[in-house]
Amino acid sequence: MHYDVAVVGGGPGGYVAAIRAAQAGKKTCLVEKGRVGGVCLNEGCIPTKTFIRTAHLLEEYRDAERFCLTGSSPGAVGVDMAGLQARKNDIVTQLTGGVSGLLKKNRVAVVQGAAAFTSPTVLKVGNESVSATDIIIASGSRPVFPKAIELAKDARLITSKEALELAVLPESVGVIGGGVIGVEFAYFLAVFGAEVHVFEAMDQILPTADAELAALARHAMEQAGVVFHTGVTVERVTGDGLVYREDGTRSEHKCEVTLMAVGRAPDATGLDLEKAGVKTERGAIVTDDRLRTSVPHVYAIGDVNGKFMLAHTASHEGEVAVDTICGLDRTMNYGTIPSCVFINPELAWIGLTERQAKERNLNFQVGRFPLANNGRALTQGETRGLVKILTEKRTGEILGAHIMAPAAGEMLGEMIVGMTLEATPDEFAVAIHAHPTLSECIAEAMADTIGKAVHK
Ligand code: NAD
């Protein structure tokens, strides 16, 4: 069968690319060996957020007295893990079913099986041969197991995938890595009642976040019961815990289960890239800012190109790749990709951290507005948080925005648009923010960059 466009992998990169290609009038097929939706829908973002929703509710329930609710007995509330699994599975089924429906509606042919290149324009899928004018690789990533961490034969080691399938909550969990997976999983496991210790090699948890916000997040996580060990390296996972090194001293930590969360690696396993001549570097497919690989008409989007391993990046790259195939002039702007960490309160940011702005010798000013100064935050009973914005002194251009707040991910939307449209503090000043809302903190932090915050 010959197609205009063949997409390999049905995650948020692949399925969006396939739908966009079909919408552009291309005869399109999507090759998927598992379920459409990829890691994000099946075993990543969506299942995690389901668990985190329960953790938020549990925290609020335990805090009910503070909101003057009577008759509640917070001590009696627990988590029905089987019920939670069922709720998660329902949501996943609903979403993956929705994606299948969208593919069908847009007349994308779904070919079930594992694809391998036989030439730059032909894929083998089982006994079938699929040829296409343009091929988009969107095969995703897999968890990293570093060679430097020795694994005992009886190590009780899991990844995020298995952690989302737990039928019973472990009594104690050791988490290797204090990145996004490490902290999100540590958060809900600790709130559910497990004793959780996180071991992070860097001095800061969430090393890619702004240091000030990462420190606030660490404090909030500690209030939820998580214990952090930073500046430590894990050397071995044993049958009943792990061994880590701190300042040259080796220590043992006992835990029932260890969660490996030290990153993910691009996964092009079984694709036989060499038969197409697609160039890789350290396992990642090399792409330019139009997602073109080293081979004409072959594109790579999402985690497999190793640039930004985030679902929304993958989807956007899919759109850019399809536009490029259609002859449109469109490139990726990797400077305006948002990040969200779904702990409590949430953390969300875009652009440069203060450290990065200093390292680049930029002439910038910082505006800050704490949630504690905001009326809505007080009524909500959640004043832990901060909005911090960096703007370029001369032009007022937004260089970075960092938010810790309930639903920070939603609040960030304003900053994503502001940064993308190159809005300045003066332009923000004419935009009226509704009262009382948390988004007033954004208006105030923007005003604070030019010394004009009112409630500070
Ligand atoms: P990550 O790169 O975010 O974090 C890994 C952490 O492990 C780093 O902080 C690193 O310093 C640390 N580390 C590495 N080796 C170590 C060692 N030997 N001992 C101790 N610490 C060590 O990776 P992740 O958290 O595994 O997430 C994988 C990918 O999935 C990332 O790209 C992430 O952005 C993505 N993800 C995103 C979200 C979200 O956007 N909310 C949620 C989950 C995962």
Image: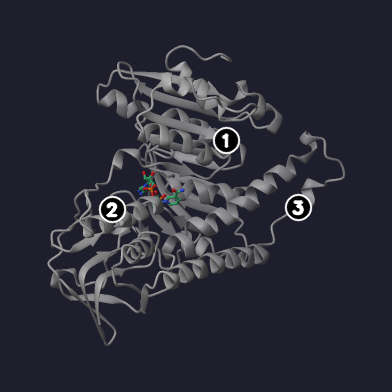
Quarter of the picture containing the C terminus is top right
**Residue at image location 78% in from the left, 46% down from the top:** 74
C-alpha span from label 2 to label 3: 47 Å
One can see residue 210 in this view:
no
**Which picture quadrant has residue 138?**
bottom left
Query: Seen in the image, is 306 located left or right of residue 366?
Result: left
Between 223 and 90, the residue placed more toward the observer is 90
Element type at marker 1?
A: helix
| Comes first in the chain, label 2 or label 1 | 1
How busy is the neighbourhood of tag 2: few (under 14 within 10 Å), some, or many (20 plus)? many
Disc number for residue 77: 3
Q: Residue 263 location in percent, x, y? A: 36, 52
Quarter of the picture containing the N terminus is bottom left
Give the labeled residue for mark 2.
320
Give the labeled residue for mark 1.
220
Element type at marker 3?
A: loop
| Comes first in the chain, label 2 or label 3 | 3
**Residue at image location 35% in from the left, 29% down from the top:** 422
Question: Amino acid under label 3?
Answer: Val
Query: Seen in the image, is 127 located left or right of residue 288?
Result: right
Q: Is residue 121 above or below residue 455?
A: below
Q: Residue 7 location in percent, x, y? A: 30, 68
Between 139 and 102, the residue placed more toward the observer is 102
C-alpha span from label 2 to label 1: 38 Å
Q: Is residue 42 above or below residue 195?
A: below
Between 319 and 404, the residue placed more toward the observer is 319
| Comes first in the chain, label 1 or label 3 | 3
Q: How is the image coloured?
A: one colour
**Residue at image location 26% in from the left, 55% down from the top:** 323
Question: Amino acid under label 1?
Answer: Ala
Question: Amino acid under label 2?
Answer: Val
Element type at marker 2?
A: helix
